[in-house]
Amino acid sequence: MRIAAVSDVHGNLPALRAVVDDIARFAPDQVVNLGDCASGPLWPAETIDLLRELGWATVRGNHDRLVGMSSDGVGLGRSDRWTWDRLGAEQRAWLATLPPALRLGEVLCLHGRHDSDEAFLMHEVREGRIVALDRETVAERLRIAAARVTLCGHSHTAGECVTDDGAAAINPGSVGWPAYRNRAPAYVCEAGAPHARYAVVDVQGGRVRSVFRAVEYDCAGAAEQAERNGRPDWAHALRTGLAPPAALRPRGT
């Protein structure tokens, strides 16, 4: 089975369109979206409309849950509230009713970890940055999840971990938001380049093979959209793939 795994689109419509075109080259049996579809100062409503049209298998991310399950938007962070205000009731309901996990044969699809959509499966924060966890810790988490192949997102950091017993965890990286600065806990996430990222995973005869893709798109246009919507921090990340300076990040995001 060949699966194209995408994650963390965050409302970046041109990045999503570029990935859709690139995926067609690989003719996957299934495309799975690992969540966080719309939250961010870009094109949330248009992105949801395209995802629904595509009909991909989709799991619910933490931002999907927060935006979709809020009845009035009160108490949401700045990005989530901006997104909530621009979605219709039907679009928010679609986010809310997405499943927290999916199984595609022997492949488990999650946003974060099996026990939390706000926790990393195969990464951790160390010295203010997202880094890969040791194989033993990842192996234990995969044993608990009881899946030979686990696809996850949330960390926006592409990577793969194959354990001694052959279980694999794969994070395709982020389609639409390549870098950010988190406040609590304090850390930065940086892909290092502004490309839209996803992965193609082949699961055949007991073997897992992953190809990680970095796709060019109109990141300058996406950055201009972020600036129009009052988010220079997002604009910096979209143009460079690097975390914005702390001074650019508004409070309440």
Image (cartoon, rainbow, N blue to C red):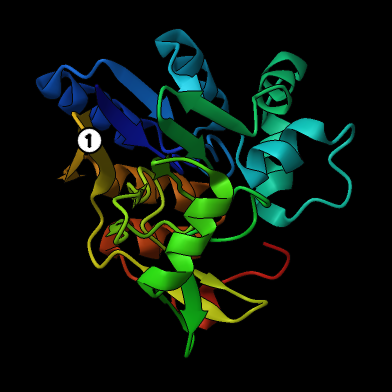
Left or right of 184 in this view: 137: left
| Foreground of the two, 114 or 53 | 114
Residue at left offset 55%, top offset 40%: 36
Q: Is residue 122 visible?
A: no
Q: Residues within 10 Å of mark 1 (few under 14, many from 20)?
A: few
Q: Relative to residue 236, is residue 53 depicted above or below?
A: above
Q: Quadrant of residue 131?
A: bottom left
Q: Which amino acid type is shown beneath numbered disc 1? A: Gly
**Image coords of residue 13 (percent x, y):** 39, 31
Residue at left offset 26%, top offset 15%: 29
| Foreground of the two, 43 or 64 | 64
Q: Residue furthest left?
A: 25
**Image coords of residue 3 (percent x, y):** 28, 27
Q: Relative to residue 205, is residue 57 depicted above or below?
A: above
Q: Residue furthest bottom?
A: 127
**Image coords of residue 118 (percent x, y):** 65, 56
Quadrant of the frame with the N terminus = top left
